[in-house]
Amino acid sequence: MTNKIDIKAYLDADEQKDLLRLLTAGSVDDGKSTLIGRLLFDSKKLYDDQLAALERDSKRVGNAGDHIDYALLLDGLKAEREEGITIDVAYRYFSTNRRKFIIADTPGHEQYTRNMITGGSTANLAIILVDARKGVITQTRRHTYLVSLLGIKHIVLAVNKMDLVDFDEKVFNAIVADYLALTSHLGIEDVTCFPLSARDGDNVVELSERTPWYSGKPLLEFLETVPIHADRNYRDFRYPVQYVLRPDLNFRGFCGKVASGVVRVGDEVVALPSMKRSRVKRIVTYDGDLQEAFPPQSVTITLEDEIDISRGEMIVHPDNLPHIGRHFTTMLVWMDEEPMDTSKQFFLKHNTNTSRASIVNIRHRVDVNTLEQKDGQPFKLNEIGQVDILTAKTLFFDAYAENRQTGAFILIDPITNNTSAVGMILQPLDERALENDLVPTLDLRRLGIGEEHYDAVECIAKELGRQGFDVKVIK
């Protein structure tokens, strides 16, 4: 009986561990996959059959000579093993006694920039690897800019291959000074630097005797203890409605995931866009009712009043509203093989909301290697820049810098269904300044439609809105 209780207590404790999502980035052959493989190996998170396969594959297709090639744990594609590089994002999960981890090993090639954006979209922390022999190079600057663009608040500078420069402290300090000059220019405040040898394991899980001048923690201990709870926005309550749950006549709840902020039973809330007010009656989950909910919990909220709320609409606090509009400026990362076509209307997916959208103005492109702003030509694959977007349907959004959950969106090609771009909203724009309005207007009196048909027209307009086509009705 004691063993059963101990097992249950262990599983309960494991369930309570928080989760750190991190990505690795850096130039080709800087050792990203090797570092993660070494992290898994030294933390004893590999099974015997994995170790046997790793030793066998290292002799057959490895690139580490007589050593074990830890990169093979992540580089699983045939082309990756043949070339000794990372092409696609590889995810690995592991846990320690303190924390759970999901690691995204992202490619270093410029042509795979979109893969890095995908891997970093949910990351709390980024590990930027630098070859100690080369220092901060163009790709280091490019990846750091992308990390800052994604709003990742914690950066680890891993100066790898220190064994090839005889663990020289002066080399390490020079690289650190050069990199901190870059991050200060980009406004990144939390940077921690480590001298490493990923192949040999120096300062990865345990401190190395070959760096007596280094007084910090080993990398794994730092990853276990870096605080990430403050990264979430608990100030602005945003609850995009995903589904209306009506199992019987006595229950009507609004299902969704708390994007940000905290909501409690009894709180006054307002539904967008109707601006109807009510109070939270219950916060329902599978395991029972809660008194409060916070991100990233998925819950069902019931209200004291009957309010018509549909998928794509949002519940917020009345004294803390998001931006409500259809016109905004955004940073855009182009991810489609087909170049940008500004005459095309895209589907814009924002939380649970979907709308038609057009790119109405290209402000500039950014040369991610030099950070220079260039002319506003249509983007090609992996290009990044600032554009203005107009949607057919009203959105409820915040600036990405303030709220990553409600400040991000994707553009979808309506013909191919490919993800054309991802965007990070900067600020709203005045819709009245637009000459070309995407939303058609129905003036019912001018069209000779009588009042007896108003309700039917409203129902049709609302159904069109749910499908991404807004219609403005004037009575």
Image (cartoon, helix red, strand yellow):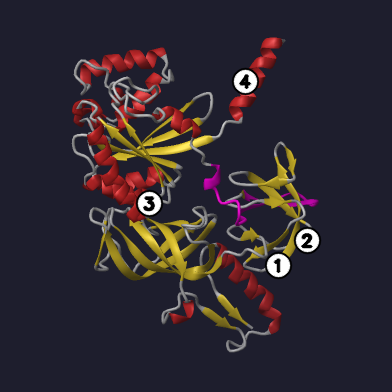
Instruction: Kindly identify which residue carries mark 3.
Output: 148
- Horizontally, residue 258 falls left or right of residue 121, namely right
Instruction: Kindly identify which residue carries mark 2.
Output: 305
Q: Look at the numbered discs 1 and 3 and tell me whether their residues touch, using CB distance below 8 Å.
A: no
Q: Look at the numbered discs 4 and 2 and tell me whether their residues touch, using CB distance below 8 Å.
A: no
Q: Is residue 75 visible?
A: no
| Residue at the outermost front position | 213
Q: Residue at x 52, y 61 (%)?
A: 398
Residue 276's disc is 1
User: Mostly what secondary structure, the magenta segment?
Assistant: strand
Q: How far, Cα to Cα, is label 1 from label 4?
A: 46 Å
Q: Look at the numbered discs 3 and 2 and tell me whether their residues touch, using CB distance below 8 Å.
A: no
Q: Earlier in the sequence, mark 1 or mark 4?
A: 4
For residue 459: magenta? no
Q: Amino acid at mark 2?
A: Asp
Depicted 438 relative to depicted 130: above or below: below
**Mark 4 or 3, closer to the camera:** 3
Q: Look at the numbered discs 2 and 1 and tell me whether their residues touch, using CB distance below 8 Å.
A: yes
Task: Please give the range of residues in magenta.
Answer: 229-256
Q: Earlier in the sequence, mark 4 or mark 3?
A: 4
Foreground of the two, 279 or 99: 99
Instruction: Kindly identify which residue carries mark 4.
Output: 10
- Measured as percent of width and height from the top left, residue 139 is found at 24, 46
Q: How far, Cα to Cα, is label 2 from label 1?
A: 10 Å
Q: Residue at x 32, y 61 (%)?
A: 385
- Horizontally, residue 69 falls left or right of residue 454, namely left
Q: Earlier in the sequence, mark 4 or mark 2?
A: 4
Foreground of the two, 305 or 406: 406
SS at mark 2 in the image: loop
